[in-house]
Amino acid sequence: MASELHRTSRKCLVSGSFKGQPQRIGAFFPLAVAGTFSFDGHGNAFRSFTLSFGGQIFPGSSDSGPYTVKSDCTASATFSDGTWNIVIVGRGKEIKAINATPGVLVEGEHTRQSEPSDKD
């Protein structure tokens, strides 16, 4: 399993850090977020972000969880707020992500900030 994940991750170039800003969907959702997603190339995803919900700021939030990458360069990552469905675009230059948890309306685009290491 680990070697398959490694080969797929390399093909889709998902390892490294991505910076972006998830977007709220609709004017009724008072949420803003800025932060990073990072993928280690071995099934571990990390994120760090500052969150504003209804104008109240929550700085320095972070968590981690598992992720998987398919051969078609789609992926999923599970964090404390649910599962994120991800599309890896432009050979890993950016990712597009949406939280697939029912009742959660957050999506975003993230741009690569660091290249995968030689270890990935």
Image: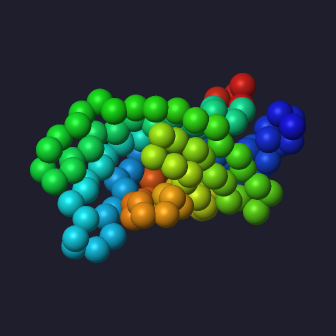
Please name the residue shown 76% across and 62% down the image: 72
Q: Position of residue 66 (x, y in %)?
A: 64, 37
**Which residue appears farthest toward the front when viewing the image?**
103
Instruction: Give the image location of residue 77, x and y in percent.
Output: 60, 47
> Can residue 93 be seen in this snapshot?
no
Residue 62's place in the image compared with 94, above or below, is: above
Horizontal relation, residue 105 to residue 86: left or right: left
In the image, what residue occupies the spot 28% across and 39% down?
50
Q: In which quarter of the image is the N terminus?
A: top right
Which residue is situated farthest in the bottom direction here?
26
Q: Residue at x 42, y 64 (%)?
A: 103
Q: Nearer the viewer, residue 26 or 11?
A: 26
Q: Position of residue 43 (x, y in %)?
A: 69, 36
Residue lying at the far left of the rendered structure: 55
Give the residue furthest to the top. Answer: 119
Is residue 3 among the parts visible in the rendering? Answer: yes
| Display coloring | rainbow
Q: In which quarter of the image is the C terminus?
A: top right
**Quadrant in the picture for residue 16:** top right
Q: Is residue 42 left or right of residue 62?
A: right
Vertical placement of 87 versus 46: above or below? below
Displayed quadrant of residue 118: top right
Which of the pair 88/22 is nearer the observer?
A: 22
Q: Nearer the viewer, residue 65 or 89?
A: 65
Labels in figure, total: 0
Q: Classify residue 103 as left or right of residue 100.
A: left
> 45 above or below 72?
above
- Looking at the picture, how far across and down is residue 102, in whole percent? 49, 63
